[in-house]
Image: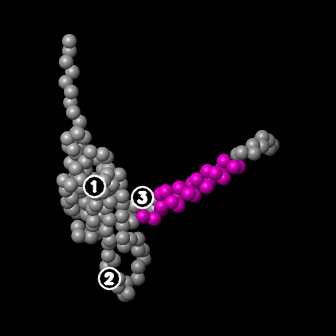
Amino acid sequence: MSSLMRWDPFRDGLSLRNAMDRLFEDSFVTPRLGWIAPVGAIGLALDMYETKDEVTIKAALPGIKPEQAEVTITGNTLTIRGESQEEKESTAENYLCKERHFGSFARTVTLPAGLKADKAEATFEDGVLTLKIPKTEEAKPKTIKVKAK
């Protein structure tokens, strides 16, 4: 037994639009091939969190030396960039799998307002870049005591 479906002239148009949106998003918004990242990831992995006194950013830079990384803050925009060099390749070895990426990388993020960029400190340990940026006094939370009448 077959079932009948009512014809909807817009159904096919919506599925075409969804397919085009997905194509655009996969190609431009979230590119699939990033540096030091699996397929589908956004590239340079980082964590950003805040305490009452500062904002901390941690970026994973495996295989990078501290002098190969560059950190710049312009206004409220943080940019981490650098370049990883490929080791000298041996022709005597037959690779079964080669997935490590080499070359330039960059990641730009927007920072919250009210930070002292000139007082920022960057440290590098075990392939993790840690950047600590203190908050201005105006940006720090204030506690106001409530008085009962």
Up-down: is 78 above or below 54? Answer: below
Q: Would you say residue 75 is visible in this rendering? A: yes
Q: Nearer the viewer, mark 2 or mark 3?
A: 3
Amino acid type, mark 1: Lys
Please tell me which of labels 1 and 3 falls first in the chain: 3
Position of 115 with respect to 29 (left or right) is left
Magenta segment, which residues? 12-34
Q: Residue at x 75, y 43 (%)?
A: 8
Residue 131's tag is: none
Q: Residue at x 45, y 65 (%)?
A: 33
Position of 31 with respect to 131 (left or right) is right
Q: Which residue is mark 2?
A: 88
Q: Are marks 2 and 1 in contact (CB under 8 Å)?
A: no
| Pointer 3 local density, CA inside 10 Å: few below 14, some 14–19, many at least 20 | some
Q: Which residue is mark 3?
A: 42
Q: In terms of secondary structure, where does tag 3 sit?
A: loop
Name the dominant secondary structure of the magenta segment. helix
Q: CA distance from mark 2 to mark 1?
A: 30 Å
Seen from the viewer's position, the closer of residues 147 and 85 is 147
Amino acid type, mark 3: Ile
Q: Which residue is mark 1?
A: 58
Q: Nearer the viewer, mark 2 or mark 1?
A: 1
Q: Position of residue 79 (x, y in %)?
A: 32, 60
Q: Position of residue 142 (x, y in %)?
A: 21, 33
In the displayed image of the protein, which residue is found farthest to the front?
75
Amino acid type, mark 2: Lys
Q: In terms of secondary structure, where does tag 2 sit?
A: loop
